[in-house]
Amino acid sequence: MTAITNHLPTAELQALDAAHHMHPFTANGELAEKGARVITRASGVTLTDSEGHEILDAMAGLWCVNIGYGRDELADVAARQMRELPYYNTFFQTTHAPAIALAAKIAELAPEGLNHVFFAGSGSEANDTNIRMVRHYWALKDKPSKSIIISRKNAYHGSSVGSGSLGGMSAMHEQGGMPIPDIHHINQPNWWAEAGDMSPEDFGLARAQELEQAILELGEDRVAAFIAEPVQGAGGVIVPPTTYWPEIQRICDKYEILLIADEVICGFGRTGNWFGSQTMGIRPDIMTIAKGLSSGYAPIGGSIVSDEVAAVIGSGEFNHGYTYSGHPVASAVALENLRILEEENIVGHVRDVAAPYLKEKWEALTDHPLVGEAKIVGMMGSIALTPNKAARAAFASDAGTVGYICRERCFANNLVMRHVGDRMIISPPLVITPDEIDTLIERARKSLDECYEILKEKDMLQSA
Ligand code: PXG
């Protein structure tokens, strides 16, 4: 077989890709016509494609390359670990140094009382662990009826059957027999799109109180846990009003509902603290982690579990685990990533330099005729595109039509800025510099201008 390398012509790579590679969340037939963009290498915040374009990756891959691309230290650690011990499991009463060291380091970084780690290969797997763990926890406490997990519409918690059921993506639930039983979804705190005339503060409270109503309707003796991202990521970087999380915490405490913070995106510095839970002032019992744990250099995820939950679960055998739980190479890579995040004070860089600078520039985008609200927490931001800011109107076209046009202009201008419906989102590597932020904003503005011109031309600036 011929080696498939970056040196093959783009068209040849695209044809092979179309013939054999099924892409996630993609209409593969359509993509085959168009040809996928081939990414060949990356360094810092910049991707290079097979045509030689240098693209500013304002999504850090898929919200994960926190330390930026091209850090040799991680490659060196991976090679060293592969030579020494490429694989061994942590079932059957065995362990190894990389998993031990990583678990200990995570416990040190995590908020007080969260000192135990159950490893997985991804965020989806970790959330599947969480479903089983919280239900089993209540069963062990002689309350087996507490099996319902409350989540939110438009949440993203993964793509496996369990985690996809936890998530609140209706387009996912329509395919493949989801959700599984005993998952209940309440509304999200999306003020821009769903608040009507309410103030952000009143709306935040009202949406949080839906949790209390759900608990009372379902029965206190039926609810095991509430799961949420501190800031919804894949749903469109929905930043909750300030009143939301304190009320959620109050309700979880009052009804003794376990709180699971899905930190897969927010964790490891993205919000300006090690964890989004710290930024939002909440005290979870379990935190889901993945992505930034290894900056995406190796697939690894896990659940950080409180002393109390770990003690109960540890009282017997928990019949759960993955071949790659605590994989030595992935663990060693993650540990090196955490060393870099810590020693280079990257979380401090976010808090003191990058995030304040980005916030100022990002919020200034609201002077653009297409931009309604601009929201940002740390290094995750969103803008709502609208034909009428005052009315917070949606476009008359199907949701996502305008967002897609804008995204295509971004790509053409060498910027990866994604769209979720008609919101544009960013989540750049945490190491981005002020100069690179200037470039990001410049390309975003140019893309917004071009998008606006297209909408004018096509008479698409109509409100729904
Ligand atoms: N929780 C959250 C909050 C996530 O964002 C997962 C769990 C699942 O992690 P894994 O490692 O199983 O993918 C995620 C993943 C998007 C997009 O379109 C976002 C994710 C994954 C794929 C696409 O923004 N987030």
Image (cartoon, grey):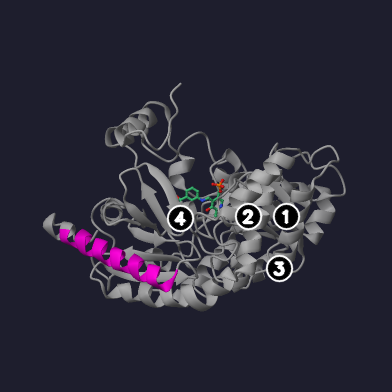
Question: Which quadrant holds the C terminus?
Answer: bottom left
Q: Which residue, given by chain and number where applicable, does mark 1 sit on?
A: 102
Marks 3 and 1, the one that precedes in the sequence = 1
Tell me the distance, in whole angstroms, between the alpha carbons under discs 4 and 2.
24 Å
Residue at mark 3: C-beta within 8 A of ligand 1: no
Q: Earlier in the sequence, mark 3 or mark 2?
A: 3
Range drawn in magenta:
433-453
Please, what secondary structure does the residue beneath circle 2 have? Answer: strand
The disc labelled 1 sits on which kind of residue? Leu
Determine crowd level at label 2: few under 14, some 14-19, many 20+ residues with C-alpha closer than 10 A: many
Residue lying at 37% horizontally and 64% vertically, measured from the top left: 193
In which quarter of the view is residue 29 placed?
top left
Q: CA distance from mark 3 to mark 4?
A: 32 Å
Q: Earlier in the sequence, mark 3 or mark 4?
A: 4
Residue that label 2 marks = 289
Q: Earlier in the sequence, mark 4 or mark 2?
A: 4
